[in-house]
Image: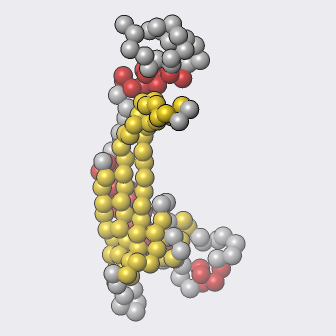
């Protein structure tokens, strides 16, 4: 499931800044490579975050993590004096805008809620990770056989 939210503000110079936040949380098939073949090993949880910043509709920056606070970190003194509080990709944002973005990320997290694997998938995962013969057929097929 994917959810999207946008945060917009206007700079002192009158530029319109928009940060689009896209959060994806879902179960996807997990595959392993077995001598060139792809073998399905169950499902895995995918949790992705994408942020894209545009200024007056033109691309400015993107990131795959929430903005990182730079206050008090070595090497960012000049940016901090100029009003920078956090880094989003290759751009810097102030504290108020940082808080808007974090609030939007939190809302998306609440909207999407938790995603979990089914009990059957969890059992299959447990069986495939045990280093012993398959309980169904007695061979080393790791539980992916069709034995009765």
Q: Position of residue 140 (x, y in %)?
A: 55, 14
> Which one is in front, 125 or 80?
125
Where in the figure is residue 32, as x and y percent of width and height?
A: 51, 34
Q: Residue 11 placed where, x, y %?
A: 39, 86
Q: Residue at coordinates 41% horizontally, 73% vertically from top-left?
A: 53
Vertical placement of residue 119 versus 56, above or below: above
User: Is 32 or 77 nearer to us in this picture?
Assistant: 32
Quadrant of the drawing holding the C terminus:
top left
Name which residue lies at 39% across and 26% down. 121
* Residue at point 42%, 40% (across, down): 45
Residue 69 image point, x, y percent = 55, 67
Q: What residue is shown at x 40% (from left), y 10% (from top)?
A: 147
- Would you say residue 36 is visible in this rendering? yes
* Outermost residue toward the front in this view: 36
What is the tally of numbered marks visible in this picture?
Answer: 0
Taking depth in this image into account, of 61 and 134 the one nearest to the observer is 134
Q: Residue 122 appears in which quarter of the rendering?
A: top left
> Colour scheme used in the picture?
secondary structure
């Amino acid at each position: 499931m994917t959810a999207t939210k946008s945060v917009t503000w206007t700079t002192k110079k009158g530029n319109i800044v928009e940060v689009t936040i896209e959060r994806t949380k879902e179960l996807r098939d997990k595959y392993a490579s077995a001598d060139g073949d792809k073998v399905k090993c169950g499902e895995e949880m995918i949790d992705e975050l994408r942020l894209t910043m545009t200024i007056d509709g033109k691309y400015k920056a993107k990131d795959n993590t929430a903005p990182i606070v730079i206050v008090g970190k070595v090497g960012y003194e000049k940016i901090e004096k100029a009003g920078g509080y956090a880094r989003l990709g290759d751009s810097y944002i102030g504290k108020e805008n940082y808080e808007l973005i974090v609030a939007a990320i939190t809302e998306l997290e609440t909207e999407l809620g938790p995603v979990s694997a089914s009990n059957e998938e969890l059992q299959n995962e447990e069986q495939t990770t045990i280093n012993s013969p398959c309980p169904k057929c007695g061979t080393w097929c790791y539980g992916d056989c069709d034995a009765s």
